[in-house]
Image: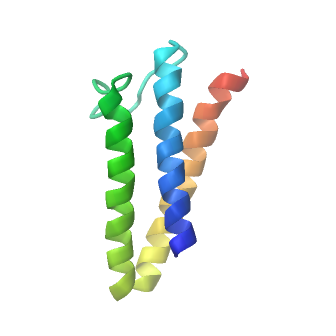
Amino acid sequence: MKYLLSLLILLNIADGVITHFVVKLGLGSEGNPFLLGLVGEPGFIILKVVGALVSAFILWDIHRRHPRLAFFSTSICVAFYVGVVTWNSTVFLL
């Protein structure tokens, strides 16, 4: 579970960094309407890092009481962020 949560944190931060550069270079836009106004600002990366850490902490807390549920939920989140980071990375390759 620790490795899965670490991977989730890294993928979430990678998503933030890639999105920051994609938007800053004018190659794409942010799809999340809640974060739309923050992209390109220093607060965006800080929010992504803090959000990733808080999410991991919550999932770890759930893991203590419901390990299977937390493992399943974290796995789904990791799979989602693998897709997001892969999708965002293709902007640089095309």
- Which residue sits furthest bottom? 65
Who's the residue at 30% across and 32% down the image? Answer: 43
Between 56 and 66, the one nearer to me in the picture: 56
x, y (%) of residue 24?
47, 16
x, y (%) of residue 19?
49, 30
Q: Quadrant of residue 32?
A: top left
Q: Quadrant of the C terminus?
A: top right
x, y (%) of residue 49?
39, 47
Q: Is residue 20 above or below residue 6?
A: above
Who's the residue at 59% across and 46% down the image? Answer: 83
Q: Is residue 25 above or below residue 79?
A: above
Q: Which scheme is used to colour this image of the protein?
A: rainbow
Residue 38 falls left or right of residue 29: left
Q: Is residue 72 above or below residue 41?
A: below
x, y (%) of residue 87?
61, 36
Who's the residue at 42% across and 75% down the image? Answer: 70
Residue 8 falls left or right of residue 58: right
Q: Quadrant of residue 85?
A: top right
Q: Is residue 67 above or below residue 44?
A: below
Between 52 and 83, the one nearer to me in the picture: 52
- Which residue sits furthest top? 26
Who's the residue at 44% across and 68% down the image? Answer: 73
